[in-house]
Image: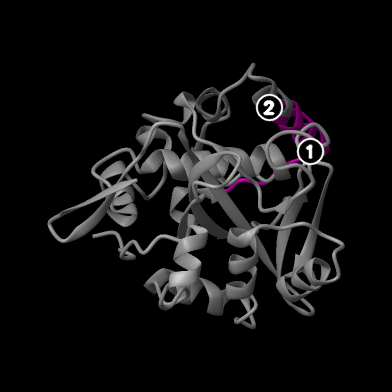
Amino acid sequence: MTRGTVKGRHLTAESEGIRKAATVLLVRQGVGGIEVFMVQRPGRGIFPNLHVFPGGKVDGDDDGLAHLCHGLGDPSASYILGIDSGGLRYWVTAIRECFEECGVLLAYRSGSLFEPASDAEAARFEAYRNALIGGDESIASLARRENLTLATDRVMYFSHWITPESAPARFDTRFFVTAMPKGQRAVGHRGETVSGSWITANDALANFDADRWQMIHPTLTTLRTVARYSNVAELLGAVSTGRHLGEVSDALHQQGLQRDRFSIAP
């Protein structure tokens, strides 16, 4: 992995074989504190059986959709990530994966956050979800057909991880966080995940400590960060100013957490 600096900002040059990806923390306020929606990966593939946050690889359909995004353009998104261009596609990937894996669509319709108006509409959007997963639909065609704009302004940049060389597969992953919108319900997709559930960060970490859940360093570090905050507003306030991560230790950096300078959109 080579790194350079342009106008004092760090840039990452993606090496061959490292796939771009996005992950989203969907959070809500629970009785015991902040809850996050987590899914369990199937017992197949590169990282089987892991409990993770919803996410996946950036693909071609996630690019060039600035006209369908609300409140954030590619120049600002790229500035936040510290890259020259193409940053907005990470936000689009996070929104698409949230819909595919959780059934939660982060979008606006007629100026308001989307929520199904009826059971029939909820069923129609569940069909869209299945079509997206099956490759028969794209997030762009869904947005145009339903007169939606993607709520990129409600998705906040959280952290940047690149899997170490020792990993079975390498990903250059941007983590994001967003508050659960009202009027929707998060449900894991059986074709994409084994299960999905709301859980506090501390309870998820306890499951790991008791060997009930398998998790890797990016997930564990993110949960430990969330566990420091008592409510969603406090967490999002810290993220909005880049105060949530603090100093990246050598140990965390060796595990893949990048030392990119956190930037706020101009």
Type of amino acid at the residue the image marks with label 2: Ile
Point out the stretch of residues depicted in magenta: 113-129
In the rendering, at what x and y percent does residue 109 appear? 55, 41
Residue matched to label 2: 133
Tell me: 263 left or right of 143: left
Residue matched to label 1: 189
Q: Quadrant of the C terminus?
A: bottom left
User: For residue 56, which quarter of the picture?
Assistant: top right
Q: Which of 147/168 is in front?
A: 168
Q: In this view of the protein, can residue 179 be seen by the observer?
A: no
Q: Is residue 118 above or below residue 263?
A: above
SS for tag 2? helix
In the rendering, at what x and y percent does residue 245 appear? 46, 73
The residue depicted at 77 percent of the width and 67 percent of the height is: 204
Discs 1, 2 touching: Cβ within 8 Å: yes
The residue depicted at 40 percent of the width and 77 percent of the height is: 247
